[in-house]
Image: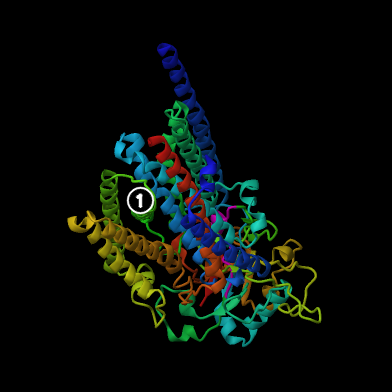
Amino acid sequence: MNVKRRDFLKIAGVSAIAGIGIPSALNMLLKGEAKATAEAEHQAAPAAHGGGHEAASTAVQLGMVINVKKFGEIKGLAEKCIEACHTTHNVPEFNNPKDAVKWVWIEDFEHLFTQQNRFAEHNALPFLTLCNHCANPPCVRACPTQATFKAPNGNVIMDYHRCIGCRFCMAACPYGARSFNWRDPREKDAGGNLKFIKKLNLDYPTRMRGVVEKCNFCAERVDKNLPPACVEACGDTKALIFGNLNDSNSEIAQVLKTTFTSQRKQELGTKPSLFYII
Amino acid sequence: MIEKALAGNNRYWTWMVFLLSIMGIGAICYTQQFAYGLGYTGMSRDVSWGLYISQFTFLVGVAAGGLMVVLPYYLHNFKAFGRVTILGEFMAIAAVAMCLLFILADLGQPMRALNVILHPTPNSMLFWDMIVLNGYLFLNVLVGWVVLHSEFKGVHYPAWVKPFIYLSIPWAISIHTVTAFLYCGLPGRHFWLTAILAPRFLASAFASGPSLLLLIALIIKRVSKFDVGNEAIQKLITIIGYAAIINFFFIGLEFFVAYYSNIPGHKHTLDYLFWGIDGFDNLVPFMRLSVILQIVSVAILLIPATRNNEKTVMLGCGLLFLGLWIDKGLGLVLGGFVPNPLEYITEYYPSLGEIAITLGVWATGFFILTILYKIAVSVKLESES
């Protein structure tokens, strides 16, 4: 009996090692290969994410350059962008900070670039603040249901129908870009009008309470080859430049090559896709 | 065995009705929250987790604390814990039940909770937390019930349950490690971003769990004939004392790293918790009280005159439990959100309804605990007489 058990344990042990070891060895080999090809393909804009030592993870990564100087020169432009975004996406206005839902808003320099020296001239400028659509997003890593995920074009977007409202993504986001529907944004007053949504846009869904939302880089417009609403609102000012960071011929890649830009909290390794010209 | 919970004296029924009424108030408040949304609570865009998640985090520790009696008894054959082990296992059941209720109460869309299983996502720590918590609940229900039922029948527990007992030991470590991973893996939240978070959680768990266990064991001794024995009490006090000191040491390490390195992000939350920032200081009295409570209670539990007196031991356990509850059940989770990623300060005040729901979940936990302990104590007393 004892001998039999010994033999059984030996076989079991060997098969366990084989079962664990062989697939992972294969995986390592496959990954090594994949990494090599990825590196070859993505030498295009290695510095785009602030560091040339790592290859970009996706073929397309949409990004945005925010020219804060332009926003300083053209009064009211930042507000126009916010208006365009919030009406396009039916973003509710609750008028109190506790329930606030924001997709894009204005911050000052010192709250956006928390680790940097304060320079009085910077603080007078309106800094547009929105989701960074990180190449390596911590919110996507944290989400337990894949309700927030990276689209093939690099956008970090939300599936409002899958979100369970655990708000793990809000804790994970180092940029404070995510909002939660603490109450029903579709609430109506006695006359049957929406209380918190001024102008209803039927081309984009309203949300229900209890789900997280944020800037989606206008995924629904980009799919139709339209620029994001905020970019469109800027017209020909070039205050916002939108495009594929990994395409060296794109306008945005050219701007990044020739202009000094800043990214928020680059040291966290999230690879934000927003670049500020200050 | 379950019938043992249906017979009791007046005091027992009064206690159960008291718990049921708190559960009822909590349930009514929950229906309001369910109808309105989580804006019913004091949580906000900046402090997006509140009492529910902080209680959950603390109670995972209470559940894991059961390990401190299970391990010596089953692994080291420490016979003196023979009577207290079942209490540890049953406390873990009640604590995990509370954890799961707190998570449900915190979901914006509770009806979609099963999405975590329908769309399994191994890169999310919440997915793993669901697995380890439910696994731990299952292990403790299985082991606790089978071992007690064997005693009820007057036989030794069957051999097949042994592997589950051994599995439950590392599993207890895993529940609190994974719970720490929920926090310490998030970039940009400096207060949580520390490799010592999991060990600190475990140390605090091994103090808070057993201190509640000992407190309840001593209360049971007063209201029934069930005595866990002096040797078990003294050994538990030693375990609690050392765990509390290690936890305190870990807190000290956090202070050293933050203030000696002088890195602003590392200091902010500690500043906020213990001194207040720009006049925002609603947690300062609690955090300072927590430090005092921890020092006083450890002194009570280590000085021979007080550790040999049951009344002072009960006091020490109660104070320590309260101190650790403030440290982890309030400061750790709520403090982590202040200041927010843009370095604004938003303070959090739970709403009345939120507090009622929280108390309701605690009452549910004690309701489960009382039933399980009533059964365990009745069976133990019967089999021994």
Tell whether A165 sits left or right of A52: right
Q: How many marks?
A: 1
Look at the image and give the residue range highlighted in magenta.
Answer: A129-144
Q: The N terminus of chain A appears in which quarter of the rendering?
A: top left
x and y, in percent, of residue B318 in the image:
34, 61
Quarter of the figure with residue A245? bottom right
Chain ID for label 1?
B
Residue under the point 54% across and 55% down: A142
Tell me the SS state at disc 1.
helix
Viewer can see residue A49? no
Whether A256 is among the magenta residues is no
Quarter of the figure with residue A267? bottom left
Q: Nearer the viewer, residue B192 or A233?
A: B192
Residue under the point 48% across and 83% down: A122
Q: Nearer the viewer, residue B37 or A221?
A: B37
Could you tell me the amino acid type at mark 1? Lys
Q: Which residue is mark 1?
A: B221
x and y, in percent, of residue A20 in the image:
49, 31
Residue under the point 24% across and 60% down: B300
Q: Is residue B294 above or below residue A101?
A: above
Of all residues, the one furthest to the left in this rendering is B304
The crowding category of the residue bearing disc 1, from other C-alpha atoms within 10 Å (few below 14, some 14 to 19, many at least 20), is some
Whether A143 is among the magenta residues is yes
Viewer can see residue A245? yes
Q: Most prominent secondary structure in the magenta stretch?
A: loop
x and y, in percent, of residue A93 in the image:
67, 78
